[in-house]
Image (cartoon, rainbow, N blue to C red):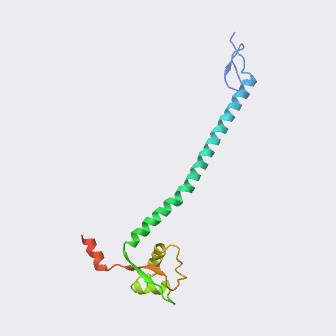
Amino acid sequence: MEKAIIYSFESGRRLDFGEKKEPEKKRVRILWNRIILALVLITLLIYGTCSLVADLIDVVPKWINTQLQYSISQDIQNYQQVKVIIQSGDTAWKIQSKLTPNERDIRHPLYLAQSLNPGVQMGDLKAGQIIIFLKEKEIKALTANASH
């Protein structure tokens, strides 16, 4: 007579008649341990992500400001600084247009001049103020530096 082989429906393993099934409490405990482990890992992931975002919120504006200041300092090297005493009726646009060649855009040197004069509103100049404006360096001087 042949022996009958019986498989467990739940685990798919072969059962012997003398084999005991895992106690229900042990399986529930294992399930809860896995749930707690998953929750701890999810919490750590969320904490790490929030920490990274908080650091980026702090660092990125500083990095952008540093890059902006570097860019402005590089652009200012192409200009000569001119101190101007503001007369009644003068506007920043009018003064900068006198210092800028006709074919050039006035807005860029005016923007750079604003960074050289912190606290000064270029749209509201008062007579007697001393403001630094920018005049392009001579082309001959620029080409002489480029050839060396």
Q: Residue furthest left?
A: 148
In this rendering, the answer to whether 75 lies above or below 22 is below
Q: In the depicted view, which residue is nearer to us: 124 or 109?
A: 124
Q: In the depicted view, which residue is nearer to us: 126 or 144?
A: 126
In percent of the image, x 61 and y 49: which residue is there? Answer: 50
Counting from the top left corner in percent of width and height, residue 66 is at 47, 62
Q: Quadrant of the N terminus?
A: top right
In this rendering, the answer to whether 43 lies above or below 62 is above
Counting from the top left corner in percent of width and height, residue 46 is at 63, 46
Question: Residue 119 vs residue 77: left or right?
Answer: right
Question: Residue 74 vs residue 143: left or right?
Answer: right
Counting from the top left corner in percent of width and height, residue 32 is at 71, 32
Q: Residue furthest right?
A: 24
In this rendering, the answer to whether 67 lies above or below 135 is above
Confirm whether residue 9 shows in the render.
no
Q: Residue furthest top?
A: 1
Confirm whether residue 110 shows in the render.
yes
Q: In the depicted view, which residue is nearer to us: 77 or 125?
A: 125
In percent of the image, x 43 and y 83: which residue is there? Answer: 84
Q: Residue furthest bottom?
A: 89
Q: In the depicted view, which residue is nearer to us: 34 or 1?
A: 34
In this rendering, the answer to whether 19 lies above or below 33 is above
In percent of the image, x 52 and y 80: which residue is there? Answer: 122
Q: Quadrant of residue 148?
A: bottom left
